[in-house]
């Protein structure tokens, strides 16, 4: 058994909604929680939402983060070479 404390305005809305639908407050809250949990289970994480876009406009070179120091050194050397 679970007991909750609600702000006055929320309690009044719950009372009105349960009377309007001719259901108990417990039944009303159980259904609301079931809907919340069902939605929470089906929501995708940020990673899942963005996954199709990750690397979409990438260079195709998977070593950029590993080789960046060497690439930077090569660019600096190329600028310093007399042309």
Image (cartoon, helix red, strand yellow):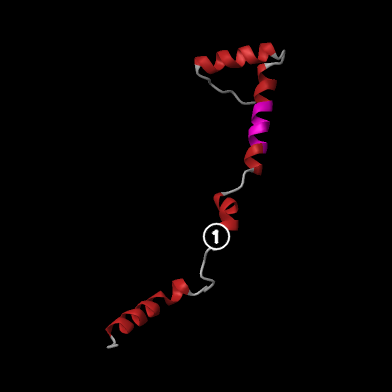
66 relative to 4, above or below: below
Residue 25: % across, % down: 66, 17
Say which residue label 1 marks. 54
13 relative to 77, above or below: above
Marks counted in the figure total 1
Q: Residue furthest front?
A: 83
Residue at image point 64% right, 15% down: 17
Q: Which range of residues does the magenta coloring cover?
A: 31-38
Residue 4: % across, % down: 56, 23
Residue 78: % across, % down: 33, 83
Q: Is residue 30 left or right of residue 62?
A: right
Residue 13: % across, % down: 58, 15
Give the structural element (helix, strand or loop) at label 1.
loop
Residue at image point 54% right, 71% down: 60
- Residue 32 belongs to magenta span: yes
39 relative to 48, above or below: above
Q: Is residue 9 left or right of residue 81?
A: right
Residue at image point 68% right, 12% down: 20
């Amino acid at each position: 058994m679970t007991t909750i404390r609600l702000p006055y305005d929320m309690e009044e809305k719950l009372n009105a909604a349960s009377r309007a639908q001719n259901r108990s407050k417990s039944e009303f809250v159980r259904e609301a929680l079931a809907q919340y949990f069902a939605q929470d289970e089906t929501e995708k994480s940020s990673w899942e939402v963005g996954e199709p876009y990750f690397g979409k406009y990438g260079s195709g070179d998977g070593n950029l983060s590993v080789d960046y120091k060497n690439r930077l050194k090569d660019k600096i050397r190329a600028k310093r070479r007399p042309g």
